Image (cartoon, grey):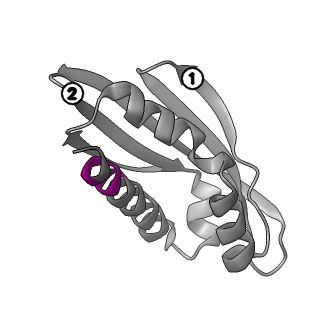
């Protein structure tokens, strides 16, 4: 199994960050972007929800040619309140060995892109809340 992660500190209250990340996959914009770019909305499941502490999501991998479900993605957000409207978030992505093999070993780059997109969205959220 592969894994990457990053830790960041952000100038936003923990409940704002938590709610943003918890609800991001239910938005109509996410669904539209998924349809426009993938042709489907991936079934993302929230498997662990500890308010203002931890979120864990998972989704089956989908082969782009056959649309078959293969392997599994899992990602998590661990939160820590730093006080004074500051939060720490550890973002982690994990994937199965099967997904690693079937992606021709590009899955780490895909996970890195997902992680970076999350960080950029939190940057925007911070900018809007300052």
Where does the image place residue 99, in percent across and percent down from the top left? 62, 61
* Image mark for residue 76: none
Where does the image place residue 3, in percent across and percent down from the top left? 42, 49
- Residue 23 location, quadrant: top right
Separation of residues labelled 2 and 1 (CA atoms):
22 Å
| Residue that numbered label 1 is attached to | 49
Q: Residues within 10 Å of mark 1 (few under 14, many from 20)?
A: some
- Residue 13 location, quadrant: top left
Regarding mark 1 in the picture, which secondary structure is present there?
Answer: strand
Proximity of marks 2 and 1: CB atoms separated by less than 8 Å: no
Judge left or right: residue 57 versus residue 110: right
Q: Can residue 89 be seen in this view?
A: yes
Vertical position of residue 100 compared to residue 83: above or below: below
Residue shown at the point (59%, 67%) measured from the top left: 101
Q: Residues within 10 Å of mark 2 (few under 14, many from 20)?
A: few
Q: Nearer the viewer, residue 72 or 54?
A: 54
Regarding mark 2 in the picture, which secondary structure is present there?
Answer: loop
Residue shown at the point (65%, 51%) measured from the top left: 27
Judge left or right: residue 3 versus residue 126: right
Q: Nearer the viewer, residue 127 or 115?
A: 127
Which portion, as a residue range, is magenta?
122-127
Residue extending farthest left: 84
* Image mark for residue 85: 2
């Amino acid at each position: 199994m592969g894994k990457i992660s990053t830790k960041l500190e952000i100038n936003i209250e923990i409940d704002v960050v938590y709610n943003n990340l918890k609800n991001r996959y239910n938005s109509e914009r996410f669904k539209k972007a998924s349809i426009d770019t993938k042709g489907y909305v991936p079934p993302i499941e929230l498997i662990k929800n500890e308010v203002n502490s931890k979120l864990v999501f998972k989704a089956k991998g989908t082969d782009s040619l056959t649309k078959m479900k293969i392997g599994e993605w899992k990602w998590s957000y661990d939160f820590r309140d730093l006080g004074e409207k500051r939060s720490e978030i550890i973002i982690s992505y994990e994937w199965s060995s099967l997904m690693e093999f079937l992606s021709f070993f590009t899955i780490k780059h895909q996970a890195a892109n997902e992680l970076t997109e999350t960080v950029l969205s939190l940057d925007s959220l911070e900018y809007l809340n300052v």
